[in-house]
Amino acid sequence: MNSDVQIAGDPLAIPHLLPPVPAHPTTVAAFAGLARSIAADRDSWEPLVRYDATTRWYHRLRTGPGYEVWLLSWVPGQSTGAHDHGASSGLLTVLSGRLTERTGGTAPDTERVLSEGNQRVFAPGYVHDIANDSLEPAVSLHIYFPGLTDMPMHPTQHARPTEAVPAAEATPAAVEAWGPGNG
């Protein structure tokens, strides 16, 4: 009886027929794997981390075709404010500490506490606020694909204009006069 190798030949003997191994990640799973491998190599990123009490600190670790990798630090109380990432998708990995992700809009906010090793993936247009609500500093890794070129800010439920129509006066005419373009 013949073996598969005798019938079809050894596929390793004809490497030109094998698909090439990509030099850079091209899928969400590959980007998540890249983030996990960077997270595991603490000696490569930990000496770079700085903490700034007045603004969030960030450092671009690397770029590749169609993506960027950023290292961010967070002192207690720092947050991004509600924002999206323009045309970029992203992957956030908590390297140390704890961060809170808030999502919402017109519905009540949803909060997720992200601890070391937790990852979040988001698509273009996804609005969230990342904050360090803990009493300890935190560090996170962010991969954007394609590279981040825009980060539009968004109003939040907690930051409504003071001149908003009070609920008692929210007649259809008052709401229409206020309108989405007036806030």
Image: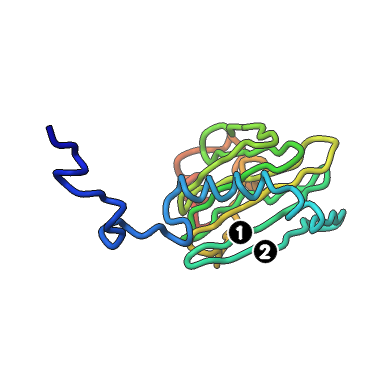
Question: Residue at coordinates 31% horizontally, 59% vertically from top-left?
Answer: 15
Question: Whole-percent x and y of residue 170?
Answer: 53, 38
Residue 179 shows which numbered tag? Answer: none
Question: Whole-percent x and y of residue 39?
Answer: 67, 46
Question: Residue at coordinates 48% horizontally, 62% vertically from top-left?
Answer: 146
Question: Whole-percent x and y of residue 175?
Answer: 49, 44
Nearest the camera: 85 or 48? 48
* Residue 162 can be seen in this image: no
The C terminus - image quarter: bottom right
The amino acid type, in three-letter code, at marker 2 is Arg
Badge 1 density bin: few <14, some 14–19, many ≥20, Cα 10 Å: many
Name the side, left or right, on which 153 lies relative to 1.
right
Nearest the camera: 69 or 25? 25
Dot 1 corresponds to which residue? Answer: 69
Dot 2 corresponds to which residue? Answer: 60
Q: Judging from the image, what secondary structure is the residue with disc 2 in? A: strand
The reply to whether discs 2 and 1 touch (Cβ–Cβ < 8 Å) is: yes
